[in-house]
Image (spheres, rainbow, N blue to C red):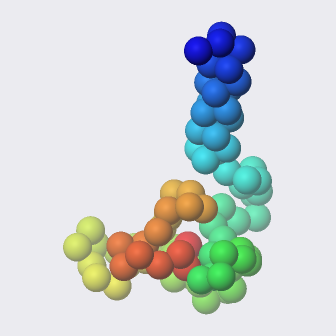
Amino acid sequence: MHPVIIIVIAISIIALLIARTFPLRFPSLKSKFVYMEEDGSVRELTKDEKEYLNEDFEYNDGNRPYIKSNYWQKTPDNKKDGF
C-alpha cells in the first residue's frame, strides 16, 4: 500500500478519536451539565433538574441519575436521552 494512503488513513482515525473524546463545547462556569433529548438535541437544565443533580445519592440508589460522559454514549436501556 502506498505510504500516502497509510498516512491519510492514520490521520483520519486520529481525528475521529479526538472528535469523539473531547466535548463539543467547553463547560462554562454556569453549569457543567446539559440534558440531551431523545432526538439528539441538547438543552440547558431547568432549576428542578439542577437541584436533582445536586442531591446526594447512595451508590446503589435506583433513583440516582445516570450521567453520560459524552454525546454518543447511550443509557443502560439503550436510549439517547439523559444528563
Image height check: is 3 above or below 73? above
Query: How many numbered discs, if any?
Result: 0
Which residue is depicted at the point 64% across and 40% down? 16
Residue 56 on image: x %, y % = 40, 73
Residue 51 on image: x %, y % = 57, 82
* Viewer-proximal residue among 81 and 59: 81
* Viewer-proximal residue among 43 and 56: 43
Q: Is residue 7 visible?
A: no
Residue 26 on image: x %, y % = 75, 50
* Viewer-proximal residue among 58 and 62: 62
Which residue is depicted at the point 35% across and 73% down? 76
Residue 8 on image: x %, y % = 70, 24
Which residue is depicted at the point 59% across and 44% down? 21
- Identify the residue at the far bottom of this view: 48
Q: Quadrant of residue 81?
A: bottom right
Viewport quadrant of the C terminus: bottom right
